[in-house]
Amino acid sequence: MSLSQDIVAELAEIAPGSPLATARATRDAATRHAQGSYETLFSQQDAAFPLDERAAVAAKVAKWHRVDALAAHYAGFGLADPTSARLTPALTFARLLTFSPVEATPGALSALTQAGWSKEAIVTLAQLIAFVSFQSRLVAGLRLLNDKTVAASDTPVVAGIWHSTPETKSGKPAPVQFTQQELGWEPWLASKPLAEFNADEQAILAKFGHTDSDYFRLLGRNLPVLEQRTLTDKGIFYTPGGLPRAERELAATVTSKINGCIYCASVHARKASQLSKDDNAVDALLAVRPGQSLSEGQSARWQAEIDFAAALSVTPPAVTPAHLAALEKQSLDTLEQLDLVQSAAFFAWANRLMLTLGEPYLP
């Protein structure tokens, strides 16, 4: 089975020339590089993680998200034996990342290493699971915007748990609550030394400011996927018009609260606070306890956006026409709605990498 030319448009049934198609064309970089991420992940010829294994994992992750058409698409590539000694721990890892990435530990990576997975293959596996988590939400969210049916979900839309251990694996002091403070992050899997990248690869890392980051040099173990992911990120968050940047950062923070990612929330809550000039509203969001609603006490516009982003971020997604109606009541147009969907969906990807490949520490 060949790769789709625009898998998201196909599965969301977006008609050419429709308002949603026009909005996606306005967000051309995000549209192209989300597709580019898909094409890169499912075209790489890699004996350490062959395509039939990738398709087996992707189909399972999409199925867990109840995006059955996406699961069927990946199943059409031909699936490796899910009970094999290699794929059994990979699918255990995939289930963990899909439903509860905050519960990942270094032991989950050790289980893959013991099953013969290389560092490069583990990074690609994590990227694939996290990408399909993003892609599933993108399809679900855009189907909703396109007035198409979306699978029902009874997942509670509430804040998730987060890490409460006061020390990292290496003994550094660790944050135990959400904060706007700047944090460090250390990997559980060794990042790739800069000297092991060739000159062209170093130039790619430098273009995005990634050379000094353990996180990005770890993801650089599959540099083509990292490059497409970074360009997708920039296309979603750094484009003019549409949803105000502060509200895109708000969506990223909401998703991070759902998933329990203190590091991602610290970065994007700080940006939301700086851009909105509303520290109190952002701090109130960060202070929400596990099991509680995230939008209580916020302005009507932020309530609608928080509720939508949170419902899209749980697994399986629980976003409904009522969530969309609340956005429309606040006069969000199609481009703003698209920006909100993409901002929340992208952090399903980002959180799953941050939470399962390493952990934050206090400087």
Image (spheres, rainbow, N blue to C red):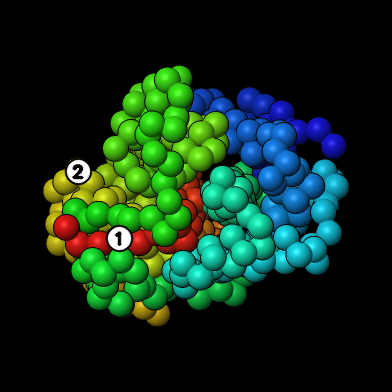
Q: Count the marks: how many?
A: 2
The residues bearing labels 1 and 2 have C-alpha atoms spaced at a distance of: 24 Å
Picture residue at 16% right of the left edge, 58% below the top = 363
Task: Give the labeled residue for mark 1.
Answer: 360
Q: Is residue 62 visible?
A: no
Picture residue at 62% right of the left edge, 44% below the top = 146
Task: Give the labeled residue for mark 2.
Answer: 275
Q: Position of residue 41 (x, y in %)?
A: 64, 39
| 296 is higher (above) or lower (below) than 150 | below
Q: Residues within 10 Å of mark 2 (few under 14, many from 20)?
A: some
Contact check, label 1 and label 2, Cβ < 8 Å:
no
Indicate the quadrant containing the N terminus: top left, top right, bottom left or bottom right: top right
Q: Position of residue 212 (x, y in %)?
A: 29, 37
Q: Where is residue 64 in the image (x, y as percent from the top left)?
A: 67, 64
Picture residue at 70% right of the left edge, 55% below the top = 57
Say which of marks 1 and 2 sits in front. Answer: 1
| 193 is higher (above) or lower (below) than 121 | above
Name the amino acid, label 1: Pro
**Quarter of image, res 20:** top right
Q: Where is residue 52 in the image (x, y as percent from the top left)?
A: 79, 47
Q: Nearer the viewer, residue 299 or 134?
A: 134
Name the amino acid, label 2: Leu
| 226 is higher (above) or lower (below) than 168 | above
Q: Is residue 149 left or right of residue 183?
A: right
